[in-house]
Image (cartoon, grey):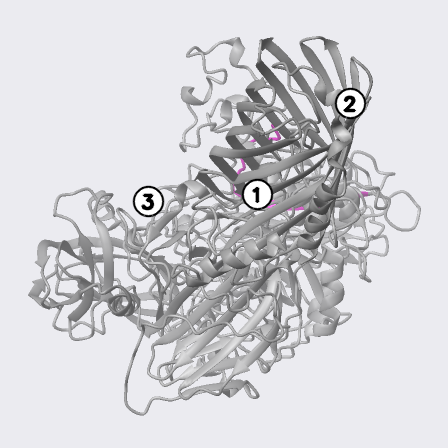
Amino acid sequence: MRTSFVASALFGLLFVFPSSTARAAGPCDRAVTGMTTGPVTVGLLRNDLGTGRATCPRTEAKLGGHLQATLEAEKYGLDVTIQVASGSPIYIVGAGRVEGSLALSKRWEVFGAAEVPQIRYLISGYQAYHLGLGDTSVGSSFLVYNRGAFAASVTGRLTLPTAVGLYQNAWPVGVDSGLTGLFEPFSFFRLHGQVSGVGSYSVSLGDPAARVGLFGLVGGELLLFDWVNLTADVQNLSFYGEGPVDHLSAAFGLRSRIWGGLGVEAQTLVPLAGTDRNLLGVRVALSYRTGALTLW
Amino acid sequence: MRGVFIAAALWGVVAASSGCTDPGCMNGEVDTCEVPSPCQPLSFSCEDGFVDLRIIRDRSEVPGGLDSLGAVGDVLLANDQVEVVIEAIGNANYFAPSGGFITDFATRGDDNDSIPHIEHVTGLLPDDAVLYTSMRFFTDEDNVRAVQVIGHLMEDPRQIVATRYEIRSCEPGIRVRTEMLNDSDEDVVWSNQEAFYWGDRATSPFTPGPGTGYTHPPFGLGTVNAVMRNVPWVVGAASVEPGASYALVGCNVDSLEGFHAAQVSLAGTGRAVVARGDYVVFERFLGAAAGTLAQPGVDLALAVREQLYDEAFVTVSGTIDLDEWAVAPRLNRASVYLLEGQPGQPDGLLVPWTHVAVAGDGTFAARVPADKAYVLRVVSFGKTAVEQALSVGTADFDVGTLEVPASGRVILRSTLDGIPHEAQVFFTPADVDTATRTAARWNGHPLANAECAPLLGPTWGGSPACNQVLTFEGYDEVHVPPGRYELFATAGPFATLAHADVTVVAGEVEDVTLSLTSLPDLLPALTLSADFHVHGAKSFDTNMPDLTRVGSFLAQRIDVIAATDHDAIWDYRQAMDELNVGDRVKLLVGLETTGHALFNYNPAVSYPQVVGHYNFWPLRIDLDAPRRGAPYDEYAEPGLLFTRMLGAGLDDDGVIQMNHPWTAGSVGRDFGFPYALGLNLLDPLPLFDDGTAAGVFVRVPPGATFSNVDYHTQEVMNGTDNGSFFAYRAFWFYLLNQGILRAGTANSDSHTLRDNVVGTPRTLVTAGTTKADFSPSIFNRAVREGRMTGTNGPVVSISLADNQGLGRGPSLEPFVPGSGPLTVRVQAAPWVPVDEVRVFVNGALAMRITDGITAPGDPYGTTGLLRLEREIALDDILPRLDEDAWVVVEAGRALPPVADLDCDGVPDTIDNNGDGVVDWTDVDRNDDGRVDDDDLDINGDGTLDDGDTPESCAGGTGPIAVRDLPLRGEPGHPFVAVTPGGYPLAFTNPLILDLDGDPGFSAPGLPEGDN
């Protein structure tokens, strides 16, 4: 119930901001190129739950891959047996990703992502893996302010348990909803931030294992050339009752325009502190971006 | 609201879905939930069935059996068919961190519990163990009783586990349902499994699969996933009467994924990634049937699967035509395998479905799946005697009468000084043909069973076992396959050895008398022989019946026994009374603590370990208490273990013994504490805990009143084959050189007749007390003071007069020597060879004596006991006469050179290639049992050159076993015949010489170059 309350409150912002706020030129009026912009979008939860979202709506299609691993080489070297015997399981998640967004207007976009395929490989004394479809996420953002050097959007996302075969008796559903912001003091430098409520709930006859938390992100993008940017963020995800800091991470992205609307990107997330043991998350993608289709 | 709506819609879909499992206690409401009744399709009926659930108030309510360990306070769940004891929550045993698991399981009224422990796990690692915290009873339903336990995985209270044990009238077992919820932050890999702790050398796992049955592939932590496989059921087969056979059948899974070994079986739901918030349920039927071998359990498993999965079975029966005059046939005389396949197929392709014992009248009957082709194989003395094809449909099948080769019968009569007396008799083939025809393994499993020639009985059970027979009150009869044999009978090292050549002819009887003569002059005055490390069926890793165990004490004429079963205190009282032992053996009630639960204590490694094994005596037995009064011994460093023993009766005169200090162990559990710590014997021990592994060895752990080094004795000889003697001796010398004076002992660590011969080796204690007026406190004080020698045959006496003229023998008490010589006297029974006497000073070999050692002409005679008597001047052996020193004397076989190739101060390699030098060329790198050119191409380039020479200390190690033992007909062979794998060896405890004028002993320190 807590999660739905937060979601409702944040979505309510859609009706608070006057629709005329975005008439003057703002950062989101800049021409769209093949180079991805916005915060790093690598996360540690299922399929983009609790990750950053760009403020400006756009239309894009993206094909890539995601890798997440807990091989603690710095502690145990490459001796898998020693790591496992020491009580530290090895968890590798890899997925192909198909994602896209559709800017229905200059202010409104819908987006989604699917993991096709996904492999989860876990070693802890025993070994097992799941190979199949991964989870799916769908969402929407609405630009509520875009003037001068500032822009802001309200965004929300729902993740669905489409990883058939992975779940036995409980199907996790996730939702995050919040506010993203963008400040462009210079043409070659942007600051971005986000605050979102995050919730998950297992649809099950057993314990729903509900969790709610808060996701925060601040970072910046530096345009090295007009066809490549470097992004660095700090992310924090904290769940209520789980401890003061679930993870505090540094994230980096290198994005480039190849030609026209075609771009390529590499992103990584490195947890610095917290209860999550993931050593590394990496995402690469090939994308095609265009401006809004302006359906209405 | 949108989220709530979506969730509700999805929940409705889930609830309507027929594939969703009843959550039971997985809703998180652990205080009020009830785990659903499992295995609903099952139904058994009978007349006058009943059920019973009670807390045990008197030990008479505990079902008996070789592995019976139930205690007052535990829970009895019983019906007209079976009796099951579930531990009280606070009664933790073996690997489990709590109670709430099955400790006894017997068929009603048969006192045949044959399983040490059954618990629940999700995997292999310590964190995969289940810890139960609460228990509830359900008694409302007619003819149904249930015990529900709830807890969590070891390190995470969020990962909830709930189990229901349910018994119904008329059912030959219990229904069990275990639910596991992953409420942690991460996905996990689980298999919801039943874990059988067979122990080893006891009840054996039997599963159907190509080339399996009792044979299971070896594995380690890194390879266990490769040996996991699916089977329709798991059966535990006993081989000692009274026995029970166990069956595990899945109710909500039609196959069980797992792995199996002589020590453990884990089987349950398949390994799977379990997402956060998800739960896994395992329902199964766990049954028991009276009898031995796999057949009773297999019959039960097939009956259950017929109900659950509509799988038809048939009964195959027949008769084995045994000898007319046969005594009640033992299991090895004839048993029948039914294997799916065709005659002529390799064994690796045949699927064993059952193994059935033959009844006293020669009949057998066993169930097998219907509509299959089988090979019926009759095994006699471990060899295939009959093999024929068999095709079954859906009707029962009788194969008729099958002929097996006749055996001979041997009557054994053993006497000592003309009076019938127990003896241990060894059968050995007298020619190559007999050896080839009779060599076999019990159940054919090469890893779990030694090769025996002949196989007179199951390797690990009562007598006869393997090729050995105990003659109770000087008599026994055995079936023996035809052939020529040499028989050797021994009554211990202080008697002669009897020998007989016997030709066994099929259908005929041989009456053999084996006459032994005692040699009382061998044993010094006021000296008692003792074995401080002995096991019987109360230990989890043997099912040797108590009568056989006590009979072996009598046969080997051991004066004092420390009863040291694993994790349980036992006194063999009933067997002692039944055999009318009286004063022939003095029993000290004790215990061997055996770490099962891994925990982190060693700063040098990141993974958890155990602390090795320790013996304690005397302790107080409490037949009503868990573990018969033994304190809980897990998660404790040695000092804390010692402290816990104070509450179990260990008094100021008691003894604490470190066992097998330098042994790796099994199932990931080290047997020796110094080895587990990874001590380097080239480095001195710190004086206090300096944060290193060596510091752990000397520290006082939290909560303890003892330090980890506050034990009294250490095994220097353990086991009949002396396999680790060099390592144990090196560690003992390491401590003596640093002034840590601990006495050395020699013990058999015998678990059965076959693995180690009890009393071989043994410790001779100059006790100052006799058996007639035995005083345990005086005896134990002598042990702690080191007034002992260790031996498996030679008797070494040393004496040095002190500065008061008093003759001093071995002890840990320093004294100032006089000016006289060291007197060395070596005696031995005529059948015990003595080639060499070695004098060590401060751990270094100071003198090797090979001249003047006499050898008796007749190994079976009574003369020639004195082998050497010599006086040695101290200045011939001591490096300095003004520095304190210690002296140890050894005698026995001339020992080959050994070396420490990995530079940890412990000898690890012997001269395996016979070139007179011990170096990297002596290492068996490919573990094929040979040291040859295949081991020398270290860089793998196909050529042997300088590029293959390894760096110093990095070229590998071993083996170090002494080989080239005398063969049949060679001098010294009689000793080997009754000391399998062993060579003659004896050692004294040290003389501690105070030479420097300062009171007390100033330890010489580690040898130069070692630190």
Mark 1 vs mark 3, CA separation in Å: 77 Å
Q: The disc numbered 3 marks a residue on which chain?
A: B
Q: Secondary structure at mark 2?
A: loop
Nearer to us of marks 3 and 2 is: 2
Q: Secondary structure at mark 3?
A: loop
Left or right relative to A255: residue A63: left
* Residue at the spot of label 2: A24
Q: Position of residue B1001 (x, y in %)?
A: 86, 48
Q: Give the image quarter of residue B878.
A: top right
* Residue at the spot of label 1: A159
Pointer 1 with pointer 3, Cβ within 8 A: no
Dot 2 or dot 1: first in sequence order is 2
Left or right relative to B218: residue B664: right
Q: Position of residue B933 (x, y in %)?
A: 42, 19
Are there few (<14), some (14-19), or many (20+) residues within 10 Å of tag 3?
some
- Which kind of residue does numbered mark 1 sit on? Thr
Asked whether A137 or B255 is in front, the reply is: A137
Asked whether B159 or B100 is in front, the reply is: B159
Report whether residue B488 is seen: no
Span shown in magenta = B885-901
Report whether residue B207 is seen: yes
Residue B99 position (above or below residue B999): below
Q: Position of residue B472 (x, y in %)?
A: 37, 73
The number of numbered badges drawn on the structure is 3
Residue A29 position (above or below residue B126): above
Q: Position of residue B939 (x, y in %)?
A: 50, 15
Q: The disc numbered 2 marks a residue on which chain?
A: A
Residue B974 position (above or below residue B19): above
* Residue at the spot of label 3: B968
